[in-house]
Image: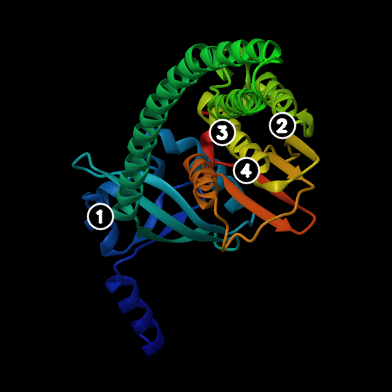
Amino acid sequence: MPHEESRMFTLFEMTPDLVCIVSKEGYFQKINPAVTKKLGYSEEELMAVPVSTFIHPNDREPTAAKRAELLNNQPLLNFQNRYCTKTGNILWLEWTSIYVPEKGLVFAIAKDITVHKQKERELQENYARFRQLAVHFKNGIEKDRKQFASDLHEDLGQLATAVKTKIEWLSSKTHDLPPQLHRHIQSLAKTTTLLVNNIRKISYAISPGEIADLGLDAALEMLSEEFSIVTGIHCKYKSSFIEEALTCEVGLDVYRVCQEALLNIMQHASASLVSIFIEHDDAGGFRLAVIDNGKGFDQQTTTFASGLTTMHSRALSINGKLSINSTGSGTAVELEIISGPEHDVLHE
């Protein structure tokens, strides 16, 4: 045997990768020891039946489609499928193959990626458990938030409004009182008015939104209208998205990101105009933007960093990306969710 052929033969025999030559008809013609070792069959058993016999039933159809492309002179690169061993175990193999038409043979090399796939599955399972836990905690927080908002609005808010009304009535009857007492009553009336307005703002900031009942689009439109009423800042809302394409979890987090952005504008921006845009892009992704014309802020020295952290956490929990761009002429908060198999939160 020539020296070069001897080296190739040694490489063929010794490599831990699965190396095989397959006929155009789909039968093993030559295999290295790694094939028999991994699959557990003898060389005679492997060559007696079509290669597809050993492929996992769920992978036979996609493998046949790829093989048809291969026989049409399209190289097969990093194709993954499952094989069944003689003992019933499942192997994940990653194939790189070429077809030599003049000989009617396929030359193929596969790496055993079973361990990698198992770790990948474990990560997916851990991620799914994390997602379930996160949803559980968020649902609990939303329940408490809804109860608190109701108590604040129905009890404390109404009580403060009643006190304000009484003081205003009393103020109108104090013309004959000493000037100092009259001034105290007027100051108290202003204080109660401020108290009622602050309660309204807090109630707005934690309001649950009723997304399950109204849907995200209607809830955001109502949120923008309430923002204008509470703050006196003109808020424009424009939407172009498919409501059914978002899960309840995503809808709630999008709502909360928008709400937190508006709360920051309310408290810090000194803005006169806010615009909210929500849309699906051509690729099936999703984008929310909240833009104001306020004074902007420095993200490194801001005093409301906890609000920014909350928005970032919300975005991460739904595989979203949050970006904040602030200048002296305003701030833009954008939440983007990319559509794709690794970003499955849009369609779960």
Q: Are marks 3 and 1 in contact (CB under 8 Å)?
A: no
Residue 325, x across and y down, in percent: 69, 56
Front residue of this view, candidates 59 and 45? 59
Amino acid type at mark 3 = Arg
Q: How is the image coloured?
A: rainbow
Cα separation, mark 3 vs mark 2, equals 18 Å
Cα separation, mark 4 vs mark 1, equals 60 Å
Disc number placed over residue 264 in the picture, else none = 4
Compared to residue 72, the image places residue 283 above or below, namely above
Left or right of 282, for residue 256:
left
Which residue position is annotated with label 2? 231
Amino acid type at mark 1 = Lys
The residue that appears at 71% across and 12% down in the rendered structure is: 172
- Sooner in the amino-acid sequence: mark 3 or mark 2: 2
The residue that appears at 22% across and 39% down in the rendered structure is: 88
Label 4 neighbour load within 10 Å: few <14, some 14-19, many 20+: some
